[in-house]
Amino acid sequence: MSPPRRIAQVILDTRLPQLDRVFDYELLDGVVAPIGAKVKVPLRSQKSLSSGYVVGLSDSTDHGGKLAALAEVTTAVPLLSPELWQLAESIANRQAGSAADVLRLAIPPRYVRVEKKWLEGDESAQAIAPHQVDLPVVEGYEAEVWGDLLRPQGRSALYQSHGVVGTLDGGSVPRATQSVSALAAAALRAGSSLVVVVPTWRDIAHYQDALRAVASEDQLSILQAEGSPSERYGNYLRGLSPRPVVVLGTRHAVFAPAWNLAGIVVVDDADSAHAEPLSPYAHTRDVALLRQQIEKCAVVFASLLPSLSVKRWIDQGYVVAHAPSVTYRAQVIPTELSVGMDRDQAPARLPSQAFRAAKEALSQGPVLVQVFRAGYSSGLACASCQERGLCKLCHGPLRIVSEGQHPLCTWCGVPDAAWRCAACSGRELTPRGRGIGRTISDIGKAFPTVPVVRSDGENRVLEVSSKPALVIATRGAEPLAEGGYRAALLLDGAAMLSRESLGALEDSLHAWERAISLVHSTGVAYLMDVTDAPALAVASGRYEHLLAHELSERSALRLPPAIRLASVSGPPHLVVQVRERMGEMFPAVDVLGPVDMGGGSIRIIVRFPYADAHLVTGELRALRNKLALSYGRNPTQRLRIVVDDPDRLDALLGE
C-alpha cells in the first residue's frame, strides 16, 4: 500500500488576475510546510520561482496531470493564519479584486534577522494571565459601557468627547483618546487583545501617549507606514504570540494578528486616509466588519460625529450609538449668522467680530486658524474675464507658491512670467482662492508682534505650547495645543462646501468638528462664510437632522452610501463586455457611461443595491480574472475595478 499523498494548497503572491486562485503542489519527503508558511513554488510560465503562502493541506487533488513539487519553505512561521486567509478572500469578493493583493497589504515584507530574534524570545512563550490594570474613569461614560462595547459580535458607534487633557508625564492628549484607552484597559483585564486603527501619524502619536497609561511597552504594538520595514515586521510577529496586545496603527493595522481578539476600534472612519488607494481599494470600515464575521469580535466606530455610512447603520439598528452624558465642546459662532458685524474694519478675510475675539484670546494663549487649501493661492484667473489661468506649455493650472513669485504650473513646474489670457489677452492674474501661504501673509500683518506657526503637509507640527501664537493649519494638520486653544477661526467655509465633490458636506463637517475639539471648553470657535442648515448644525453641535437630510437626498438620487457602486475602466472592447454582462444578469443594476478617459480607455459606473451586492461583485471579479487571459501580461490592456469609491463620481462632475 502506497503512502498517502501530501499536497500543499498555495496562493501565489502575484499581481496577475488570471492567477487569482489556489494551486496544488506536491510535498516531497522531508519537506514540512505548515499552513500559513511562506513558500516558493515553480510556475510553468516563469523561469524563476514564485512566492506564495500555504493556505491548506490535503491528501488529494482535482488536478488531472502531474503535480509540480513545492520548491522551498521560506519560513515555517505561520504568517498567514486561516482567519486572515478567509478575510482576504472575503475582501476580494466584496471588492472584485484579488486575494493576493489583500495579503500584500496585510503582511509586511519578511526580515530574517527580526524573525530569528522573535523566534528565540517566543520559544517558551505562554499565554499570560489577564493584565491587572484599573479601568480609567472617563467622565461622561458609565464604567459598564466598556464591557458592553466589547461584547462579542457587537457593533457600536462611540461618540467621543471634545477638548484636551493632561497626561501623567505632563503632556497633553485629545480628550477623545480617553475612551479608547478605557476600551484597551477593559480588553487587557479580560486577557484579550484590541486593534485600534487611526487615520494618520498624528493620531498615532496622540493615541500612543494615551494608551501608555493602561498598556506596558511590551503590550503595545505600533503598525504605521512611517516605521521602518523591520519594525513593521517585528510588530506584526508580536501579534502572533499567545499574549494580549493592543495594536495601534493606520489602515493596514486592521489586518494585524492579535491573540484572543476582543474588538476592533476604527477612529474617525470618515477620514479619507481610511480608504485604501491600492487594489482592491477596501475601506478600513468594511474590512473591520468582514473580520468581525470571521473572528466574532466587537467593532467600535469612534468619532466626534458619525460618518454618513455609520449614521445610516445607526438608523437601521445595525449599529448602536453611545454618547457621553457631559460635553466639553467649545462655543461655536457662525459669523454669517451674527448681527451687527462690520467687515470693513477687519483685516484680510476676518470679520471684525472674529478679529476682536482672536486679539483678546491671544492675550491668554494660542489661537488656531484653519485653512482649506495648501500653497499660497489655490488657483489663478484672469482679472478681466475670470478665465482660469493655465500653463501655455501643458495647460495645467497655475498657482503662486509664495508671495512675490511668478505663477508656477502645478503640472510641469514651469514658471510663467509673461502670461497672457487666451480669451481676452489680459495680462493680470488674480487669485481664485487663498491657500495657507496667502493666509499667513494676510493675517500675520494684522498681528505683527505675535509668533506664527505653520502646519501643513510640508511643515508637520504635532504640538504647540500654551504661549500666545497664531497657529495656521490646513484641515487635518491642526497641531495639539497644551491645554487647548483659546479660540479658533475656521476659514473658507464656502469654498469647502462648494467644491465639486460628493463628500464635500461630510468632509467639511468632520474637519470643522476636529478643529473645534482642540479648543478649550471656555474658548470660542468662529465659523466663516457658512449659512443655513450647516451653520446651525455646527453652532449647536447637533447633526442628526442635517445628516438624515443628506442621506435622504442620496437615497433619492441613488448615490452612496444608499447604494453601492463600482467603477470599471480599461480598453473599450473589455469594458463593453462587462457592461453587457451586467445588463444581462442583473436587471436592478444601473450602468452610467461609458466615458472616454483618453489614451484608448473608457470607464463605466455600475450602481447596484445591497441586496445584489455579493452577486454583482462576485461576477465582476470573475469577469476581471477571465478577461485577463485575453491580454496576458500587458498592464495597459487590463480592467481596473474600484468598488465603493465616491471619487469615481467626483471625477464625472468635472467632465
Image: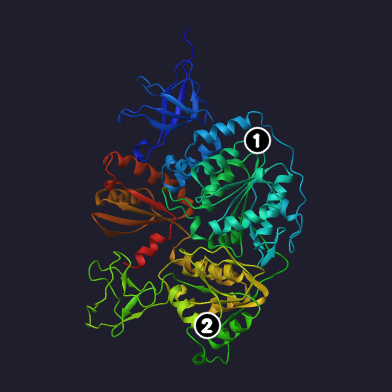
Q: How many marks?
A: 2
Q: Nearer the viewer, mark 2 or mark 1?
A: 2
Left or right for 359, reference 212: left
Circle 1 residue: 242
Q: Residue at x 75, y 63 (%)?
A: 139
Mark 1: amino acid:
Pro
Quarter occupied by residue 40: top left
Determine the residue positioned at 44% across, 48% down: 95
Residue 324 versus residue 230 in the image, above or below: below
Left/right placement of residue 400 relative to residue 99 reads left
**Which is nearer the eye, 627 or 251?**
251
The local crowd at label 2, few if under 14, some if 14 to 19, many if 20 or more residues have their Cα within 10 Å, is few
**Residue 201, visible in the rendered structure:** yes
**Residue holding disc 2:** 448
Dot 1: within a 10 Å radius of its alpha carbon, few (fewer than 14), some, or many (20 or more) residues? some
Where 105 falls versus 494 (above or below)?
A: above
Can you say whether 380 is above or below 216 in the image?
below
Residues at badges 2 and 1 in contact (C-beta under 8 Å)? no
Query: Residue 561, can we see it?
Result: no
- Image quadrant holding the C terminus, namely bottom left
Where 595 sits versus 575, above or below?
A: below
Q: Position of residue 285 (x, y in %)?
A: 54, 53
Q: Determine the image quadrant of residue 331.
A: bottom right
How far separated are the C-alphas under marks 2 and 1? 59 Å
